[in-house]
Amino acid sequence: MCITMIAFALKFLVALIFRSSCLPCGYPPWSFSKVRRQMELKGDKRKKKNKKQETSVKRPMIVTPYVEKVSEAIVRIMKKYNVPVAMKP
């Protein structure tokens, strides 16, 4: 299996789990997409500064609410695959 396929599958599973568990807790559905957009804009600004380093593959971004110990574990796993993770308090 390709790393990008694994990263995409992980992104999908994490998003499904967090959305199903966080929406009943009061997180609005738009908050995840807003954080993702903000992180992508920051990434675009960095790319303009570092055009020489465009050899890296763009990875999907994961936006998750902060859950003690769980979020840190997800970040560690995603770092292995160079997948950016944004956490919302």
Image (tube, grey):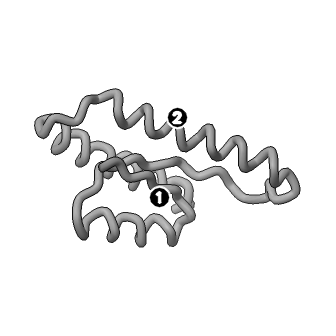
Q: Residue furthest right?
A: 52
| Rendered location of residue 54, percent (x, y) | 80, 54
Residue at 24% from the left image edge and 40% from the top image edge = 19
* Residue closest to the eye, 60 or 39: 39
Circle 1: element type: helix
* Residue closest to the eye, 43 or 82: 43
User: Is residue 2 among what the camera can see?
Assistant: yes
| Rendered location of residue 35, percent (x, y) | 44, 39
- Residue 66 shown left or right of residue 25 in the figure: right
Q: Mark 1 or 2 closer to N-term?
A: 1
Q: Amino acid at mark 2?
A: Arg
- What residue would you read off at disc 1? 6
Q: Amino acid at mark 1?
A: Ile
Residue at 27% from the left image edge and 43% from the top image edge = 16
State which quadrant residue 66 falls in: bottom left
Of badges 1 and 2, nearer the viewer stands 2
| Rendered location of residue 31, percent (x, y) | 35, 33
- Where is 71 relative to 89, above or below? below
Residue at 81% from the left image edge and 59% from the top image edge = 53
The tag on residue 32 is: none
- What residue would you read off at disc 2? 37
- Residue 23 shown left or right of residue 43 in the figure: left
